[in-house]
Amino acid sequence: MNKSNLHDHSANPSAVAQNSNASNVEGRAADAEMARALGTTPFSMALDPSGGGIAHWKHDPLHDVVQPMSDHVIMAYNGVVQRMERRSGRTVSPGTFRRGAVVIIPAGSSSRWDIPKPVDVVQLYLPPAMLKRVAEEAETATKADLLDRTAHHDPVMSQLLLGAVGSLKGNGPLDTLFRQQLTELLATRLLMTHVGSPNTAQPVVGGLSPMVLRRAIERLRSNSDADVSLAALASDAGLSRFHFCRSFKESTGLSPHAWLRQYRLDQAMDMLRDPEMPVVSVAAALGYSSQTAFAAAFRQLTGETPTEWRLRLR
């Protein structure tokens, strides 16, 4: 299986800039500008070669100007409740950071931030071209012009983004597919609730044809180095990523990521039923980077570690 597209920036802050996504909007790459303004490196980060990225930051109080960035930046707060202030030109926007609050910095904008306490935040970097593509694929009349948001209450978006932290390390193909689907979902949420003229996406009608569905499942089941990215799955089906995800769920009842996760769990259980097969061998066979990563993923789905589950069979 492919390795996770996770870049380690802990040793070299300049590496953040070197791995940034390009965009048509003038400004510094979001991950690089954040590293400069925050004076640190991300706790963990994963950048997608096709655009976008998610980063988890833990940083000290901030009293600085965040310069224009080429990507939209959406942040979900995960720290202690605190008051803060954002200044854009003559506009002063006070707010309260708490769980459920999100911040939206549209690409190309600049503002001064005064945050008195340490911050724990998860950030989504979304290229404007990607947001525009999602709007076109969803067949909405919405313009992809994001609104500035300062500590805006959106528990749905906050929970989705904070839940992405676990995908920034561990099993590559599953985490990559999850991040891609999550980015598409968050982009859709942005278009529905955080643009100048919110609109609702057109409902999908029907699922995938049997042949297209079979081909998608064959790719997902592959234990080789087959590309199981959302882009590859959608391309095989001859659909946009937006419509592929919705049609796949219409056909199977699960998103591509959820389907693959369940399939991998079924594989793991079949292997664990063999008492002679070590847990570490099961983890390696399924493409996990370590036995620890496999155990964490297994426990998240079953509530038990692989060893506990195997012992219960006896």
Image (spheres, rainbow, N blue to C red):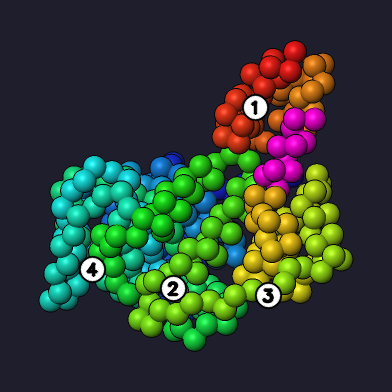
Are discs 2 and 1 less than 8 Å apart at CB? Answer: no
Q: Is residue 108 left or right of residue 276?
A: left
Q: Is residue 106 left or right of residue 116?
A: right
Position above or below: 268 against 44 = above
With respect to residue 250, does 204 lie above or below? below
Q: Where residue 113 appears, x then y in whole percent?
A: 20, 60
Tag 2 or tag 4, which sits nearer the N-term? 4
- Residue in the picture at 75% in, 13% down: 314
Query: Residue farthest to the right?
Result: 211
For label 4, the residue is 111
The segment highlighted magenta reads 260-270
User: Which callout, 3 or 2, points to the residue nearer the camera?
Assistant: 3
Q: CA distance from mark 4 to mark 3?
A: 43 Å
Q: Which residue is mark 1?
A: 291
In percent of width and height, residue 60 lies at 24, 44
Label 2, residues with CA under 10 Å away: few <14, some 14-19, many ≥20:
some
Q: Nearer the viewer, mark 4 or mark 2?
A: 2
The amino acid at mark 3 is Val
Q: Residue at x 64, y 18 (%)?
A: 308
